[in-house]
Image (cartoon, rainbow, N blue to C red):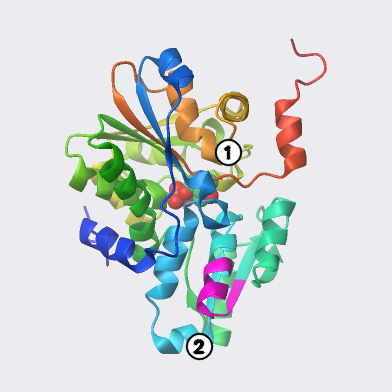
Protein backbone atom coordinates (compact mmCIF):
# COMPACT_ATOMS: atom_id res chain seq x y z
CA UNK A 1 0.00 0.00 0.00
CA UNK A 2 1.30 3.47 -0.87
CA UNK A 3 2.01 5.69 2.14
CA UNK A 4 -0.63 8.36 2.61
CA UNK A 5 0.32 11.60 4.33
CA UNK A 6 -1.13 12.12 7.81
CA UNK A 7 -3.18 9.01 8.49
CA UNK A 8 -4.71 9.56 11.91
CA UNK A 9 -4.17 7.06 14.73
CA UNK A 10 -6.08 6.24 17.91
CA UNK A 11 -3.90 8.80 19.75
CA UNK A 12 -5.50 11.43 17.49
CA UNK A 13 -8.97 10.18 18.47
CA UNK A 14 -8.01 10.58 22.14
CA UNK A 15 -6.68 14.08 21.48
CA UNK A 16 -9.90 14.95 19.64
CA UNK A 17 -11.97 13.69 22.58
CA UNK A 18 -10.12 16.08 24.90
CA UNK A 19 -10.43 18.95 22.41
CA UNK A 20 -14.21 18.67 21.98
CA UNK A 21 -15.10 17.67 25.55
CA UNK A 22 -17.78 19.84 27.09
CA UNK A 23 -18.74 21.37 23.72
CA UNK A 24 -19.91 18.24 21.87
CA UNK A 25 -22.61 16.22 23.62
CA UNK A 26 -21.74 12.85 25.10
CA UNK A 27 -24.80 11.32 23.41
CA UNK A 28 -26.83 8.59 25.09
CA UNK A 29 -26.59 4.90 24.26
CA UNK A 30 -30.13 3.57 23.75
CA UNK A 31 -31.37 -0.01 23.90
CA UNK A 32 -34.64 -1.63 22.87
CA UNK A 33 -36.05 -4.94 24.11
CA UNK A 34 -38.11 -5.18 20.92
CA UNK A 35 -35.08 -4.68 18.68
CA UNK A 36 -33.13 -7.26 20.69
CA UNK A 37 -35.98 -9.78 20.52
CA UNK A 38 -36.41 -9.32 16.77
CA UNK A 39 -32.72 -9.71 15.97
CA UNK A 40 -31.60 -12.08 18.72
CA UNK A 41 -28.74 -9.67 19.41
CA UNK A 42 -27.87 -7.22 22.14
CA UNK A 43 -27.98 -3.89 20.28
CA UNK A 44 -26.45 -0.67 21.61
CA UNK A 45 -27.58 2.37 19.63
CA UNK A 46 -25.23 5.37 19.87
CA UNK A 47 -27.68 8.24 19.40
CA UNK A 48 -25.73 10.78 17.37
CA UNK A 49 -29.09 11.99 16.04
CA UNK A 50 -29.14 13.81 19.41
CA UNK A 51 -25.69 15.38 18.85
CA UNK A 52 -25.39 19.17 18.50
CA UNK A 53 -26.38 20.25 14.98
CA UNK A 54 -28.14 16.87 14.71
CA UNK A 55 -25.32 14.54 13.64
CA UNK A 56 -21.89 13.12 14.57
CA UNK A 57 -20.35 15.54 12.06
CA UNK A 58 -20.24 18.20 14.78
CA UNK A 59 -17.45 16.16 16.42
CA UNK A 60 -15.11 16.23 13.44
CA UNK A 61 -16.00 19.82 12.53
CA UNK A 62 -15.30 21.14 16.01
CA UNK A 63 -12.10 19.13 16.32
CA UNK A 64 -10.86 20.50 12.98
CA UNK A 65 -11.79 24.11 13.80
CA UNK A 66 -10.22 23.91 17.26
CA UNK A 67 -7.03 22.58 15.65
CA UNK A 68 -6.60 25.62 13.35
CA UNK A 69 -3.75 28.10 13.78
CA UNK A 70 -4.68 31.59 15.04
CA UNK A 71 -4.13 33.02 11.52
CA UNK A 72 -6.41 30.40 9.97
CA UNK A 73 -9.07 31.09 12.56
CA UNK A 74 -9.09 34.77 11.59
CA UNK A 75 -9.32 34.14 7.83
CA UNK A 76 -11.92 31.42 8.16
CA UNK A 77 -12.71 28.05 6.60
CA UNK A 78 -14.45 26.72 3.50
CA UNK A 79 -16.13 23.38 3.06
CA UNK A 80 -18.40 21.49 0.68
CA UNK A 81 -21.13 19.18 1.91
CA UNK A 82 -24.57 17.75 1.26
CA UNK A 83 -25.70 19.07 4.59
CA UNK A 84 -24.73 17.77 8.00
CA UNK A 85 -21.05 18.62 7.71
CA UNK A 86 -22.00 22.07 6.43
CA UNK A 87 -24.32 22.64 9.36
CA UNK A 88 -21.71 21.42 11.80
CA UNK A 89 -18.95 23.60 10.36
CA UNK A 90 -21.26 26.64 10.41
CA UNK A 91 -22.30 25.90 13.99
CA UNK A 92 -18.80 25.13 15.27
CA UNK A 93 -17.53 28.23 13.44
CA UNK A 94 -20.09 30.39 15.17
CA UNK A 95 -19.26 28.92 18.59
CA UNK A 96 -15.56 29.50 17.98
CA UNK A 97 -15.88 32.89 16.25
CA UNK A 98 -14.43 31.54 12.97
CA UNK A 99 -16.00 32.71 9.63
CA UNK A 100 -17.32 29.85 7.45
CA UNK A 101 -18.15 29.49 3.76
CA UNK A 102 -20.19 26.44 2.71
CA UNK A 103 -20.36 25.14 -0.88
CA UNK A 104 -23.65 23.22 -1.02
CA UNK A 105 -25.59 21.33 -3.70
CA UNK A 106 -28.66 23.20 -4.99
CA UNK A 107 -30.84 20.16 -4.22
CA UNK A 108 -29.74 19.77 -0.59
CA UNK A 109 -32.70 19.28 1.79
CA UNK A 110 -34.35 22.61 2.68
CA UNK A 111 -34.02 22.01 6.43
CA UNK A 112 -30.27 21.48 6.16
CA UNK A 113 -29.76 24.55 3.97
CA UNK A 114 -31.84 26.77 6.28
CA UNK A 115 -30.03 25.48 9.36
CA UNK A 116 -26.62 26.17 7.79
CA UNK A 117 -27.60 29.76 7.03
CA UNK A 118 -29.20 30.08 10.45
CA UNK A 119 -25.90 29.12 12.09
CA UNK A 120 -24.27 32.01 10.24
CA UNK A 121 -22.52 30.10 7.43
CA UNK A 122 -22.14 31.87 4.06
CA UNK A 123 -23.79 29.45 1.58
CA UNK A 124 -22.70 29.09 -2.10
CA UNK A 125 -24.84 26.75 -4.23
CA UNK A 126 -23.64 24.39 -6.99
CA UNK A 127 -25.12 21.64 -9.20
CA UNK A 128 -24.01 18.26 -7.85
CA UNK A 129 -24.58 16.48 -11.17
CA UNK A 130 -22.52 18.86 -13.35
CA UNK A 131 -20.09 20.86 -11.17
CA UNK A 132 -17.04 19.83 -9.12
CA UNK A 133 -17.50 21.03 -5.55
CA UNK A 134 -13.89 20.41 -4.61
CA UNK A 135 -12.67 22.67 -7.42
CA UNK A 136 -15.05 25.39 -6.24
CA UNK A 137 -13.75 24.98 -2.69
CA UNK A 138 -10.11 25.12 -3.82
CA UNK A 139 -10.71 28.29 -5.81
CA UNK A 140 -12.32 29.98 -2.80
CA UNK A 141 -9.48 28.81 -0.60
CA UNK A 142 -6.93 30.41 -2.93
CA UNK A 143 -8.87 33.64 -3.46
CA UNK A 144 -9.72 34.28 0.18
CA UNK A 145 -7.04 32.37 2.11
CA UNK A 146 -9.61 30.05 3.69
CA UNK A 147 -8.62 26.70 5.24
CA UNK A 148 -10.40 23.78 3.56
CA UNK A 149 -12.17 21.36 5.93
CA UNK A 150 -13.68 18.67 3.69
CA UNK A 151 -16.47 16.43 5.00
CA UNK A 152 -14.36 13.29 5.43
CA UNK A 153 -10.92 13.52 3.82
CA UNK A 154 -9.11 15.22 6.71
CA UNK A 155 -7.19 13.70 9.65
CA UNK A 156 -8.79 16.00 12.26
CA UNK A 157 -12.27 15.25 10.90
CA UNK A 158 -11.65 11.48 10.98
CA UNK A 159 -10.21 11.65 14.51
CA UNK A 160 -13.19 13.70 15.72
CA UNK A 161 -15.69 11.24 14.23
CA UNK A 162 -13.94 8.39 16.08
CA UNK A 163 -14.88 9.89 19.44
CA UNK A 164 -18.47 8.60 19.20
CA UNK A 165 -17.28 4.98 19.17
CA UNK A 166 -14.75 5.74 21.92
CA UNK A 167 -17.64 6.91 24.14
CA UNK A 168 -19.83 3.97 23.13
CA UNK A 169 -17.27 1.29 24.02
CA UNK A 170 -16.20 3.08 27.19
CA UNK A 171 -19.84 3.07 28.26
CA UNK A 172 -21.02 -0.44 27.32
CA UNK A 173 -17.79 -2.44 27.21
CA UNK A 174 -16.31 -4.58 24.45
CA UNK A 175 -18.40 -5.35 21.36
CA UNK A 176 -18.44 -8.31 18.97
CA UNK A 177 -19.54 -6.15 16.08
CA UNK A 178 -19.80 -2.46 15.25
CA UNK A 179 -22.11 -1.28 12.44
CA UNK A 180 -21.36 2.14 10.96
CA UNK A 181 -23.20 4.27 8.39
CA UNK A 182 -20.89 4.88 5.43
CA UNK A 183 -20.57 7.67 2.89
CA UNK A 184 -17.04 8.87 2.25
CA UNK A 185 -15.72 6.91 5.19
CA UNK A 186 -14.73 9.55 7.75
CA UNK A 187 -17.06 8.12 10.36
CA UNK A 188 -16.13 4.53 9.51
CA UNK A 189 -12.37 5.08 9.63
CA UNK A 190 -12.50 7.04 12.88
CA UNK A 191 -14.83 4.45 14.42
CA UNK A 192 -12.53 1.61 13.33
CA UNK A 193 -9.52 3.30 14.96
CA UNK A 194 -11.45 3.53 18.25
CA UNK A 195 -12.78 -0.05 18.02
CA UNK A 196 -9.33 -1.48 17.29
CA UNK A 197 -7.89 0.23 20.36
CA UNK A 198 -10.74 -0.30 22.82
CA UNK A 199 -12.34 -3.57 21.72
CA UNK A 200 -9.70 -5.65 19.95
CA UNK A 201 -11.27 -8.38 17.82
CA UNK A 202 -14.48 -6.41 17.29
CA UNK A 203 -15.65 -6.79 13.68
CA UNK A 204 -16.23 -3.38 12.13
CA UNK A 205 -18.71 -3.28 9.24
CA UNK A 206 -19.59 -0.28 7.08
CA UNK A 207 -23.10 0.05 5.65
CA UNK A 208 -23.75 1.87 2.37
CA UNK A 209 -26.95 2.53 0.43
CA UNK A 210 -27.48 -0.21 -2.19
CA UNK A 211 -27.39 2.39 -4.98
CA UNK A 212 -24.11 3.90 -3.73
CA UNK A 213 -21.75 1.02 -2.91
CA UNK A 214 -18.51 2.75 -3.98
CA UNK A 215 -16.57 1.56 -0.94
CA UNK A 216 -17.82 -2.02 -1.24
CA UNK A 217 -16.73 -2.01 -4.90
CA UNK A 218 -13.41 -0.40 -3.99
CA UNK A 219 -12.63 -3.07 -1.37
CA UNK A 220 -13.46 -5.83 -3.85
CA UNK A 221 -11.25 -4.26 -6.53
CA UNK A 222 -8.40 -3.46 -4.11
CA UNK A 223 -8.33 0.13 -5.40
CA UNK A 224 -10.60 3.18 -5.29
CA UNK A 225 -13.57 2.74 -7.62
CA UNK A 226 -15.55 5.87 -8.56
CA UNK A 227 -19.24 5.45 -9.35
CA UNK A 228 -21.74 7.95 -10.83
CA UNK A 229 -23.32 10.15 -8.14
CA UNK A 230 -25.78 7.71 -6.54
CA UNK A 231 -29.51 8.36 -6.05
CA UNK A 232 -30.89 7.22 -2.70
CA UNK A 233 -32.90 8.69 0.16
CA UNK A 234 -29.66 8.42 2.19
CA UNK A 235 -28.68 11.97 1.20
CA UNK A 236 -25.69 12.04 3.57
CA UNK A 237 -24.06 9.05 1.86
CA UNK A 238 -24.17 10.02 -1.82
CA UNK A 239 -20.40 9.99 -2.30
CA UNK A 240 -18.99 8.68 -5.60
CA UNK A 241 -15.77 7.38 -3.96
CA UNK A 242 -13.83 7.18 -0.70
CA UNK A 243 -10.61 9.24 -0.43
CA UNK A 244 -7.13 7.70 -0.47
CA UNK A 245 -6.93 8.42 3.26
CA UNK A 246 -10.27 6.88 4.29
CA UNK A 247 -9.82 3.95 1.90
CA UNK A 248 -6.38 3.12 3.38
CA UNK A 249 -7.83 3.04 6.90
CA UNK A 250 -10.89 1.06 5.80
CA UNK A 251 -8.75 -1.50 3.96
CA UNK A 252 -6.63 -1.99 7.07
CA UNK A 253 -9.29 -1.94 9.81
CA UNK A 254 -12.71 -2.77 8.40
CA UNK A 255 -13.89 -6.38 8.05
CA UNK A 256 -16.57 -5.85 5.44
CA UNK A 257 -18.91 -3.37 3.75
CA UNK A 258 -22.55 -4.31 3.16
CA UNK A 259 -25.47 -2.47 1.56
CA UNK A 260 -29.11 -1.88 2.37
CA UNK A 261 -31.99 -0.82 0.07
CA UNK A 262 -33.91 2.42 0.63
CA UNK A 263 -36.94 0.39 1.72
CA UNK A 264 -34.90 -0.93 4.65
CA UNK A 265 -34.06 2.63 5.68
CA UNK A 266 -37.76 3.55 5.70
CA UNK A 267 -38.56 0.48 7.82
CA UNK A 268 -35.86 1.44 10.31
CA UNK A 269 -37.05 5.08 10.44
CA UNK A 270 -40.53 3.81 11.23
CA UNK A 271 -39.22 1.52 13.97
CA UNK A 272 -37.33 4.38 15.63
CA UNK A 273 -40.38 6.66 15.60
CA UNK A 274 -42.91 4.01 16.66
CA UNK A 275 -40.90 2.05 19.19
CA UNK A 276 -38.05 4.22 20.42
CA UNK A 277 -39.67 7.66 19.97
CA UNK A 278 -36.67 9.11 18.18
CA UNK A 279 -36.20 10.73 14.77
CA UNK A 280 -33.34 9.26 12.74
CA UNK A 281 -32.72 10.56 9.21
CA UNK A 282 -32.51 8.06 6.31
CA UNK A 283 -28.68 8.09 6.20
CA UNK A 284 -28.61 7.67 9.96
CA UNK A 285 -30.59 4.42 9.60
CA UNK A 286 -28.03 2.62 7.39
CA UNK A 287 -26.30 0.71 10.21
CA UNK A 288 -29.54 -0.16 11.99
CA UNK A 289 -31.17 -1.32 8.75
CA UNK A 290 -28.29 -3.78 8.23
CA UNK A 291 -28.97 -5.27 11.66
CA UNK A 292 -32.77 -5.34 11.22
CA UNK A 293 -32.79 -6.59 7.64
CA UNK A 294 -30.18 -9.34 8.00
CA UNK A 295 -27.49 -7.80 5.77
CA UNK A 296 -25.10 -8.69 8.62
CA UNK A 297 -25.70 -11.66 10.97
CA UNK A 298 -26.10 -10.20 14.47
CA UNK A 299 -27.83 -12.97 16.44
CA UNK A 300 -26.13 -13.81 19.74
CA UNK A 301 -23.72 -10.88 19.47
CA UNK A 302 -23.12 -7.62 21.31
CA UNK A 303 -23.51 -5.07 18.56
CA UNK A 304 -22.80 -1.34 18.51
CA UNK A 305 -25.00 0.54 16.03
CA UNK A 306 -24.21 4.15 15.19
CA UNK A 307 -27.35 6.23 14.58
CA UNK A 308 -25.41 8.90 12.74
CA UNK A 309 -27.91 11.75 12.41
CA UNK A 310 -31.45 13.02 12.84
CA UNK A 311 -31.81 15.88 10.35
CA UNK A 312 -34.85 15.19 8.19
CA UNK A 313 -37.57 17.64 7.10
CA UNK A 314 -40.75 16.89 9.09
CA UNK A 315 -42.72 16.83 5.80
CA UNK A 316 -40.22 14.39 4.26
CA UNK A 317 -40.35 12.22 7.37
CA UNK A 318 -44.16 12.17 7.21
CA UNK A 319 -44.12 11.16 3.56
CA UNK A 320 -41.53 8.40 4.16
CA UNK A 321 -43.76 7.01 6.90
CA UNK A 322 -47.04 7.24 4.96
CA UNK A 323 -47.77 4.10 2.91
CA UNK A 324 -47.98 5.06 -0.77
CA UNK A 325 -51.30 4.57 -2.58
CA UNK A 326 -51.34 1.24 -4.39
CA UNK A 327 -48.89 -0.49 -2.03
CA UNK A 328 -50.21 -2.99 0.50
C1 LIG B 1 -22.00 12.33 6.59
C2 LIG B 1 -22.94 11.36 7.15
C3 LIG B 1 -22.69 9.98 7.06
C4 LIG B 1 -21.51 9.41 6.32
O1 LIG B 1 -20.29 9.81 6.92
P1 LIG B 1 -18.92 9.64 6.11
O2 LIG B 1 -17.89 10.12 7.05
O3 LIG B 1 -19.02 10.48 4.88
O4 LIG B 1 -18.80 8.22 5.76
C5 LIG B 1 -23.58 9.11 7.67
N1 LIG B 1 -24.68 9.56 8.30
C6 LIG B 1 -24.95 10.88 8.40
C7 LIG B 1 -26.19 11.29 9.13
C8 LIG B 1 -24.09 11.82 7.84
O5 LIG B 1 -24.38 13.12 7.95
Residue 93 falls inside the magenta stretch: yes
Residue 146 falls inside the magenta stretch: no
Compared with 231, 24 (above or below) is below
Return the disc, 2 or 1, that comes first in the chain's sequence.
Answer: 2
- Please, what secondary structure does the residue beneath circle 1 have? loop
Q: Residue at x 42, y 61 (%)?
A: 60
Quickly name the residue at label 2.
Answer: 74
Using residue 7 as the reference point, say whether residue 216 is left or right of it.
Answer: right
Residue 264 placement: quadrant: top right
Mark number displayed over residue 280: 1
Q: In the rendered image, is residue 41 in sight?
A: yes
Q: Residue at x 62, y 47 (%)?
A: 311
Residue found at the very far top of the displayed protein: 328
Q: Which label lies toward us, 2 or 1? A: 1
Q: Position of residue 88 (x, y in %)?
A: 54, 62
The magenta stretch is: 91-101
Q: In the rendered image, is residue 241 in sight?
A: no
Q: In the depicted view, which residue is nearer to us: 311 or 24? A: 24
Q: In the depicted view, which residue is nearer to us: 70 or 8? A: 70
* Other-residue count near label 1 (Cα within 10 Å), few / some / many at <14 / 14–19 / ≥20: many
Q: Residue at x 38, y 41 (%)?
A: 218
Q: Position of residue 212 (x, y in %)?
A: 53, 38
Q: In the depicted view, which residue is nearer to us: 325 or 272? A: 272
Q: Quadrant of the C terminus?
A: top right
Compared with 297, 80 (above or below) is below
Amino acid sequence: MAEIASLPTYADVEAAARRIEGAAHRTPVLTSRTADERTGARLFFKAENLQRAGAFKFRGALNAIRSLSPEQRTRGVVTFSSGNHAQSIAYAGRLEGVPTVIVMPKDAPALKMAATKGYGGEVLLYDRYTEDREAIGRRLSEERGLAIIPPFDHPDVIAGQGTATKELIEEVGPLDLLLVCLGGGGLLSGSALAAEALSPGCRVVGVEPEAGNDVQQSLAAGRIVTIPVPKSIADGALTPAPSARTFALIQRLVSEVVTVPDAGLVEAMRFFVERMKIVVEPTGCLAAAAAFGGAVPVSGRRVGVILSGGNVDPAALASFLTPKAGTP
